[in-house]
Image: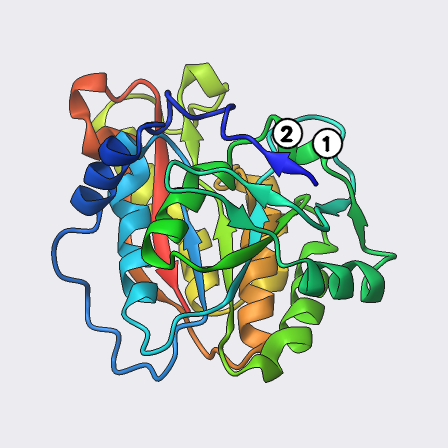
Amino acid sequence: MYRREYSWAAGGFYPTDAQRAERMIEDCMKGPLPALHNEPLLIAGIVPHAGWVFSGPTAGKVFKALGERKEAPHTAICFGSIHVPGVRKAAAIREGAWQTPFGDIEIDSKLADRILDELKSEIVENRSPHEEEHSIEVVLPFLKRVFPDISIVPIMMPPDDRAAPIGEKLGNMVKGEGGAVILLGSSDLTHYGSRFGFTPAGRGPKAVEWVKERNDRRLIDMALEMRAEDVVDEADRNRNACGAGAIAATIAAARAMGAKKGFLLEQTTSYDVHPQEGAETFVGYAGIIF
């Protein structure tokens, strides 16, 4: 049986030791959440996937909100951003498990079978895109910590115009599960600076303000307004998401499941979290719940 080791980002992006990982997650989930206006059931989240010292507190707010549901979900469909080359089609894994510092997370093979059978022209069974990719790996320890018995269906989602329709089909597929299936989209926002070859607003604090108030905010507002079909084009034009496919699929699936709007729990950048790193190169993050 396939078992995906936590070897790519572990020890760098997050600790491999369970006690250290638990302490970091507890720190990331401290503090109150913004009011969610008594939403009856939270069904989806968009989380960043950088090193926990940078994006962990933003991701932690999403997982804390999901953890306050009255009933724990049994499966999370996880849409990953793609940082490895050559992935032209959405790719899922049918069976097995992913390793985390808190033990394995099993793949929901029954749901994965159904997805791969019913959407076989749009999603292929392919482990390769997952092997050296961190976007799902980095957030799974949070998921396992909050929901110890949860299973997953990991899907790498290319940033193209197929993402939103695939998400919509998946949302329609699971909307009758009564909230037992949740959705996670993993993506950071603007990657700014000479390291990334992207400096349209110059350098320094003014560039950080431009990223937060203009570049990232446009994409965040699309998510809050459930405009799944606009996300990929926005990210193509303005380079404000590394996982536009994951974001679009999550929004479309949540909308199909009945979500009417999103809630922004936190927006920040790596510069805000660690200003000592300087404003030459930084990355934007948002935690959004549906």
Residue beneath label 1, please?
128
**Along the viewing direction, whichever of 227 and 127 lies nearer the viewer:** 127
Q: Say what amino acid the circle numbered 1 marks.
A: Ser
Q: Say what amino acid the circle numbered 2 marks.
A: Glu
Q: Residue at x 55, y 43 (%)?
A: 243
User: Going by the image, does 44 lie left or right of 87?
Assistant: left
Question: CB atoms at circles 1 and 2 under 8 Å apart?
Answer: yes
Q: Residue at x 31, y 28 (%)?
A: 17
**Along the viewing direction, whichever of 232 and 56 lies nearer the viewer:** 56
Q: Residue at x 42, y 66 (%)?
A: 224
Residue 51 higher or lower than 174, as above or below: above
**Image quarter of residue 188:** top left
**Along the viewing direction, whichever of 181 and 240 lies nearer the viewer:** 181
Residue beneath label 2, please?
131
Residue 192 location (% of width, % of height): 40, 27
| Residue extending farthest top | 195
| Residue extending farthest left | 31
Neighbour tally class for label 1: few under 14, some 14-19, many 20 plus, Cα within 10 Å: few
Residue 38 location (% of width, % of height): 26, 83
Residue 176 location (% of width, % of height): 61, 84
**Image quarter of residue 289:** bottom left
